[in-house]
Image: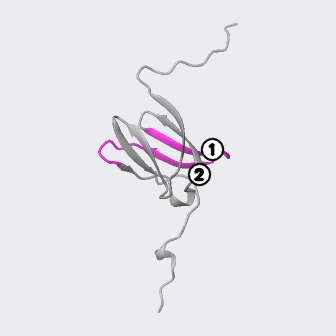
Amino acid sequence: TPKAAPSIASQGEHWRVRTDRVDADGKVTLRHAGRLRHLGIGRAHKHKRIIVLVREADVTAVEHGTGEILAEFTIDPTRGYQPKKQNTPGPKTGGVNDVPTHP
């Protein structure tokens, strides 16, 4: 029987793993395609240690201690600031629209 071995990545795929800390504004910087990109993790996660997993243009931010997915991104090369994907799991916080209107 053949020995177990890791699968070989397709030609051209680019994988990176790095650890970082979310800044006070809830952002992390990542160099992608020769430019710095600002990933908006969220102020609720400021100063947390995270692991950033990068595969081509897909980025996932995971909390270092728990493994909880904090944010997912698809890098848009035309933008410097990268907002989270809408379907990213995490706490849902209400805004001003959640306040009932007065009669």
Q: In the image, 74: left or right of 80?
A: right
Q: Is residue 84 above or below residue 94?
A: above
Q: Residue furthest right?
A: 1
x, y (%) of residue 57? 41, 37
* Image quadrant occupied by the N terminus: top right
x, y (%) of residue 76? 35, 44
Residue at the spot 50% in from the left edge and 58% down from the top edge: 24
Q: Are circles 1 and 2 on residues that touch, CB within 8 Å?
A: yes
Residue type of the residue flagged with mark 2: Lys
Residue type of the residue flagged with mark 1: His
- Measured in 3D between alpha carbons, the distance from the residue under mark 1 to the one under mark 2, in whole angstroms, is 8 Å
Q: Who is closer to the viewer here, 101 or 69?
A: 69
Question: At numbered mark 1, what does the secondary structure look like: helix, strand or loop?
Answer: loop
Residue at the spot 45% in from the left edge and 46% down from the top edge: 73
Residue at the spot 63% in from the left edge and 44% down from the top edge: 64
> For residue 65: magenta?
yes
Q: Which mark is residue 48?
A: 2
Question: What colouring method underlies this structural image?
Answer: one colour
Q: In the image, 2: left or right of 32?
A: right
x, y (%) of residue 39? 44, 49
x, y (%) of residue 55? 47, 33
| Mark 1 Cα-neighbour bin, 10 Å: few <14, some 14–19, many ≥20 | some
Q: Determine which residue is flagged by label 1.
A: 64
> For residue 19: magenta?
no
Question: At numbered mark 2, what does the secondary structure look like: helix, strand or loop?
Answer: loop
Q: Residue furthest top?
A: 1
The number of callouts visible is 2
Residue at the spot 34% in from the left edge and 48% down from the top edge: 80
| Mark 2 Cα-neighbour bin, 10 Å: few <14, some 14–19, many ≥20 | some
User: Which stretch is magenta?
Assistant: 58-80
Write down the quadrant of residue 7 in the picture: top right
